[in-house]
């Protein structure tokens, strides 16, 4: 059996990231970022409005333009920024909100991050790795009882959850067909949040059918990164992590996702880091991040940095940073998660595209559905702020005027990577998505919704169908409208998984 120490020695392959570096320098220049933030203080309102116009044309902003947005102090100008951010989201993604759930498969970890409940030195953490049968059981709850269609599957970095284990769990998830009241439910898109991997391992996962590959840099600030990721651990290698997406694209993975953990360092710096990362990927591969995440630090068991940090992000600044990311990388999906309380999530949703619901982050927690009400901090990575059920979230979204989308069609139709980037930047992807949102929402309402949620959802579907019909000949041909109505009737009669 492979030992932990021998496994660690084999993980990092320096040649797979150093070839992208400029000598010993990576693409994040801390001094340059600080200088741009300082240089662009007190921006003129006319300059900010011109920047907003550029964003509305779905063009990635420059670092100086983003720094200018970060330095706005006028509350009324911030309101204009929020309004513009919402317009961009509507232009690119329509009024959809995509839902998903996290599935934690293992909390064993060789790292010792000072902000994480999974850290190696947390002896109070109850360690567990799901067997493949347990993975299927968890999936059965998510797909059969709750109605999720896509997951983000999470793993600690450890030989027990290496790439082969990840591949096996992905296959296990896709194999599940869980009984529902009208047939069966299944997971149609498996995204993963996992440690940085080699090109070889990522190629294997590509063949298995990985969805989006998500790695958060945590903090882009080199000194802070070093402070919170102790030397001698795998995660202490800043560049191995920073170039994860480069290796993913080399391996043929279509969609990649980046993020920062806000609260480790200054929030303005981290927003700039995310922008630089997006620009680097666009420059190297012609494809930016499929999604960007911006979780805030929340309480975690035996995680000393959570209590010590002086960089905690207020709700006001949280809303600002999301707005600036939306303007700076206008084509990307933005994910707001159950780390945030419902009040905060609802306030920032006009700028975001994805959120989770019925969230449980303990390993094996979904199998305890209805049995455990309280969060067990010694069984999970951090404390979540919103444990509302999917049915409740869907109803509230409907009442707010959003349609919940369970669509995964684009990934199976080749609308990934460069293809989807072109559609997003042109605003065409939203047209496909509206059609598939209607169909998948109809399907979910019939299979899983409570009567109250179904009534709220029916109103949204009626409105969306009317919008499509009004757009006939402009956004949709008469033939597409006719096909939509046909698919819709077939779904109401019990067929499933019809899409454009």
Image: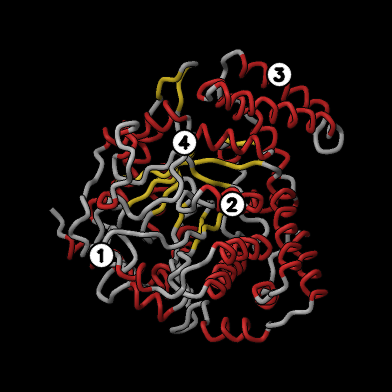
Relative to the observer, which residue lies in front, 90 or 9? 90
Mark positioned earlier in the residue sequence (1 or 4): 1
Q: Identify the residue under disc 2.
A: 417
Q: Few, some or many C-alpha atoms within 10 Å of disc 3 (few <14, some 14-19, many ≥20)?
A: few
- Give the vertical position of 216 relative to 305 (above or below): above
Residue 183, compared with residue 267, is above or below; it is above
Task: From the image, state whether disc 2 or disc 4 is nearer to you.
Answer: 4
The residue depicted at 29 percent of the width and 44 percent of the height is 363
The image's mark for residue 486 is 3
Quarter of the figure with the C terminus: top right
* Mark identifier at residue 10: 1
Distance, label 2 to label 4, CA atoms, is 32 Å
Q: Position of residue 23 (x, y in %)?
A: 46, 84
Residue 237 sits in which quadrant? bottom left
Q: How many marks?
A: 4
Which residue lies under the disc numbered 4? 389
- Mark 1 lies on a secondary structure that is helix
Q: Position of residue 209 (x, y in %)?
A: 44, 42
Q: CA distance from mark 1 to mark 4?
A: 42 Å
Mark 1–mark 3 Cα distance, whole angstroms, equals 54 Å
């Amino acid at each position: 059996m492979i030992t932990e120490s021998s496994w660690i020695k084999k993980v990092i392959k320096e040649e797979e990231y150093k070839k992208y570096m400029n000598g010993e320098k990576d693409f994040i220049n801390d001094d340059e970022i600080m200088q741009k933030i300082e240089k662009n203080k007190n921006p003129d309102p006319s300059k900010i409005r011109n920047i907003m116009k550029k964003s509305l044309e779905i063009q990635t902003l420059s670092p100086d333009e983003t720094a200018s947005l970060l330095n706005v102090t006028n509350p009324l100008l911030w309101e204009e920024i929020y309004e513009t951010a919402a317009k961009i989201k509507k232009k690119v993604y329509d009024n959809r909100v995509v839902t998903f759930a996290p599935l934690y498969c293992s909390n064993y970890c060789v790292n010792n991050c000072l902000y994480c409940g999974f850290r190696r030195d947390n002896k109070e953490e109850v360690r567990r790795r799901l067997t493949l049968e347990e993975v299927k059981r968890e999936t059965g709850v998510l797909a059969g009882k709750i109605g999720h269609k896509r997951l983000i599957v999470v793993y600690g970095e450890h030989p027990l959850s290496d790439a082969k284990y990840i591949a096996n769990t992905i296959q296990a998830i896709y194999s599940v067909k869980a009984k529902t009241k009208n047939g069966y439910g299944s997971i149609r898109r498996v995204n993963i949040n996992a440690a940085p991997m080699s090109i070889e391992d990522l190629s294997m996962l590509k063949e298995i059918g990985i969805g989006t590959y998500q790695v958060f840099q945590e903090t882009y600030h080199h000194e802070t990164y070093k402070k919170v990721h102790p030397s001698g651990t795998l995660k202490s290698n800043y560049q191995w992590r920073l170039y994860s997406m480069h290796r993913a694209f080399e391996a043929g993975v279509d969609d990649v996702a980046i993020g920062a953990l806000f609260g480790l360092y200054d929030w303005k710096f981290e927003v700039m880091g995310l922008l630089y990362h997006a620009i680097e990927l666009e420059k190297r591969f012609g494809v930016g991040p499929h999604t960007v995440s911006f979780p805030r630090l929340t309480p975690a068991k035996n995680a000393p940095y959570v209590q010590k940090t002086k960089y905690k992000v207020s709700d006001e600044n949280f809303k600002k940073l999301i707005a600036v990311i939306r303007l700076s990388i206008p084509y990307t999906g933005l994910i707001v998660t159950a780390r945030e309380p419902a009040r905060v999530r609802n306030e920032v949703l006009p700028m975001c595209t994805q959120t989770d619901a019925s969230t449980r982050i303990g390993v094996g927690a979904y199998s305890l559905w209805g049995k455990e009400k309280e969060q067990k901090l010694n069984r999970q990575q951090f404390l979540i702020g919103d444990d509302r059920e999917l049915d409740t979230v869907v109803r509230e979204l409907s009442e707010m005027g959003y349609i919940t989308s369970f669509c995964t069609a684009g990934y199976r139709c080749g609308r990934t990577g460069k293809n989807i980037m072109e559609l997003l930047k042109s605003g065409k992807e939203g047209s496909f998505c509206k059609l598939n949102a209607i169909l998948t929402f109809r399907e979910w309402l019939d299979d899983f919704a409570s009567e109250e949620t179904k009534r709220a959802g029916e109103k949204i579907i009626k409105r969306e169908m009317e919008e499509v019909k009004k757009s006939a000949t402009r956004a949709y041909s008469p033939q597409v409208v006719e096909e939509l109505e046909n698919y819709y009737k077939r779904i109401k009669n019990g067929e499933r998984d019809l899409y454009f």
